[in-house]
Amino acid sequence: MASAGDTIQIIKDISDIIPWGTIAAVFIAWLKYHPKRKIIFTSKNHTVVHAEGLSVKQIEQLLPHCEHVMVVDTKKSKNKTA
């Protein structure tokens, strides 16, 4: 059974063939759809970059150097608990 660590290793192993431009375009589209969403990149040297205001090209250049990508959707849930 694969774990999250295995997934990260697979991504690192194929990083030379990942379509970073396509992934960057998806990130930008996702941010534009809901203005309260956030994407935060942490590079291998621990630099933190927020995606808001970046272009597809900038994110494409940033992605291969990232150690972590955090995606936050701040939209409230429609399910309410008592």
Image (cartoon, grey):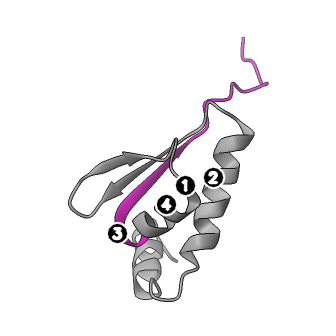
In magenta segment, residue 24? no
Residue bearing the label numbered 2:
28
Residue bearing the label numbered 3:
65
Residue contact between numbered discs 4 and 2, judged by CB atoms under 8 Å: yes
| Residue ID at (41%, 87%) | 13
Residue bearing the label numbered 1:
55
Residue contact between numbered discs 3 and 1, judged by CB atoms under 8 Å: no
Residue at the left extreme?
Answer: 45
Residue contact between numbered discs 2 and 1, judged by CB atoms under 8 Å: yes
Q: Earlier in the sequence, mark 4 or mark 3?
A: 4
| Residue ID at (77%, 24%) | 79
Q: Which mark is residue 59?
A: 4
> In the rendering, at what x and y percent does residue 48 appear?
31, 48
In magenta segment, residue 69? yes
- Graded by Cα atoms within 10 Å as few (under 14), some (14 to 19) or many (20 or more), the crowding at tag 2 reads some
The mark lying in front, picked from 4 and 3, is 4
- Graded by Cα atoms within 10 Å as few (under 14), some (14 to 19) or many (20 or more), the crowding at tag 4 reads many
Nearer to me, 10 or 22: 22
Residue contact between numbered discs 4 and 1, judged by CB atoms under 8 Å: yes
Q: CA distance from mark 2 to mark 3?
A: 18 Å
- Which residues, given as a range, are shown in magenta? 64-82
Q: Amino acid at mark 3?
A: His
